[in-house]
Image (cartoon, grey):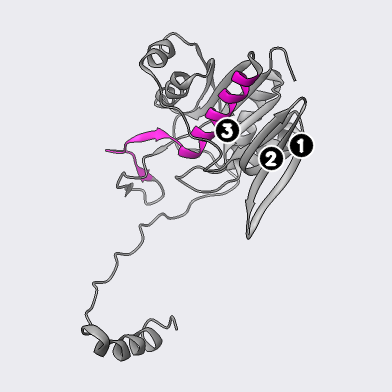
Amino acid sequence: MGGNVIQVVCVKRVPDTETRVKVASDGRNLDPAGVTWVLNPYDEFAVEQALRVREKLGAGEVIVISMGAAGVQTTLRNALAMGADRAIHLRHEGVAPDSLEVARALEAAIRPLAPALVWLGKQAVDDDAAQVGPMLATLLDLPCVSVVASFELSGDAATLEREIEGGREVIEVRLPALLTTDKGLNEPRYASLKGIMAAKRKPIEEFAVTPGAPNIEVTALTLPPPRSAGRRVGEGAAAVPELVRLLREEARVI
């Protein structure tokens, strides 16, 4: 693989995992007030791997793309500061569409680019659906390998490893292909001051999108119930019989 190789990385703006989220008054969405938004951590591995491929080849273009409201541009700037060349913002205000409608919007924007590689994180940490990647691959008619933990490029093919129960699965895939990345694939770089300044000058194309009717509907959203208070059953070895009894008769875990 050589020449002007195009790679597309799909990224998502998500709440920081340290943020304490609240359910909105409608009971069906999260309240965005006070939420700290970040680039989805799994997408950072995707951006980093695309940059490494470009660096290995010594040429090519890395394009980041995301869908959402105005705040998405900050997330795209973060990816540009890491080293991506340009960005595409699929502008959509209001309630986030479901995974299939997101995949359809991404497919329409990505297909004309004819990328050799399309990258996504294996899942977004807000909904943990892990659906957009495989759906997008199907719409683009590309082979899809998910949860990639190792990547080695050789010509027009790549050798990949996936974590599976009890070991690793080795897969060879011909390009073009779509890959979703797992933790451990690489160590994402920090944006340098030079990269942050350069990102301000890199282009972000914006296109308004109107998703179709939702295929699923969220009817209610609730926080998990608070944990019950702990209970002391005694101290030392003398407490063991009572602890075993409670685990068996009340908790029913043994």
Name the kind of residue labelled 2 in the image: Leu
Q: Judge whether 4 appears above or below 246 on screen.
A: above
In front of the other: 27 or 140: 140
Q: Quadrant of residue 167?
A: bottom right
Magenta segment boundaries in residue numbering: 30-56
Mark 2–mark 3 Cα distance, whole angstroms, equals 33 Å
Q: Residue at x 43, y 26 (%)?
A: 75
In front of the other: 213 or 12: 12
Note whether residue 100 is visible: no
Q: Quadrant of residue 227?
A: bottom left
Q: Are marks 1 and 2 in contact (CB under 8 Å)?
A: yes
Q: Nearer the viewer, mark 2 or mark 3?
A: 2
Q: Let me know if residue 50 is in the magenta part.
A: yes
Residue 14, horizontal then vertical, whole percent: 42, 38
Residue under numbered circle 3? 211
Q: Judge whether 253 appears above or below 30 on screen.
A: below
State the SS at label 1.
Answer: strand
Q: Are marks 2 and 3 in contact (CB under 8 Å)?
A: no
Sequence-earlier tag: 1 or 2: 2
Mark 3–mark 1 Cα distance, whole angstroms, equals 32 Å
Q: Residue at x 29, y 90 (%)?
A: 242
Task: Locate the N terminus by quadrant.
Answer: top right
Residue under numbered circle 2? 160
Q: Residues within 10 Å of mark 1 (few under 14, many from 20)?
A: some
The dot on residue 173 is 1
Q: Let me know if residue 155 is in the magenta part.
A: no
Note whether residue 180 is visible: yes
